[in-house]
Image: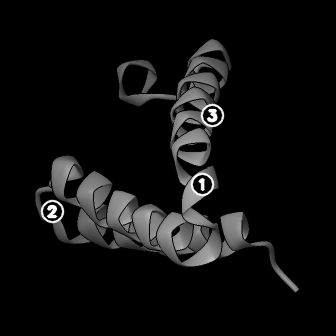
Amino acid sequence: MASLYEDANNVVMAHLRKALETGNTINVADWVSDISRALADMILHGAPSVDQAALIAHAHRQLDQHIAEKRAQGIGIEKQ
């Protein structure tokens, strides 16, 4: 069984491939908004309100860390 990350990443990559194959413009801001809404739902429905602020801060730190790690690996549109 795939992890939640793998499932979500597969969906994102499928949308990205489809957009690139069809020549459609990718509205990354809209994609980020959609993913952040799903994350907000996960936090609000999955954690007690007393823990939510810490989870939001954790999500910010994790996003910063993952972006830094992927940039260090040469992943990003500037490298393509």
Is residue 52 visible to us here? yes
Give the quadrant of residue 37.
bottom left
CA distance for labels 2 and 3: 31 Å
Q: Identify the residue at horizontal 70%, vertical 72% (top origin).
A: 4
Reading the image, the residue beneath label 3 is 62
Query: Is 2 positioned to the left or the right of 11 in the image?
Result: right
Q: Identify the residue at horizontal 58%, vertical 18% (top origin).
A: 68
Q: Identify the residue at horizontal 62%, vertical 67% (top origin).
A: 48
CA distance for labels 1 and 3: 20 Å
Position of residue 57 relative to residue 36, above or below, is above
- The kind of residue on which mark 3 rests is Gln
Circle number at residue 23: 2
Sooner in the amino-acid sequence: mark 2 or mark 3: 2
- Circle 1 or circle 3, nearest the eye: 1
- Circle 2 or circle 1, nearest the eye: 1
Q: Position of residue 41 (x, y in %)?
A: 44, 73
Mark 3 crowd level (few <14, some 14–19, many ≥20, 10 Å Cα):
few
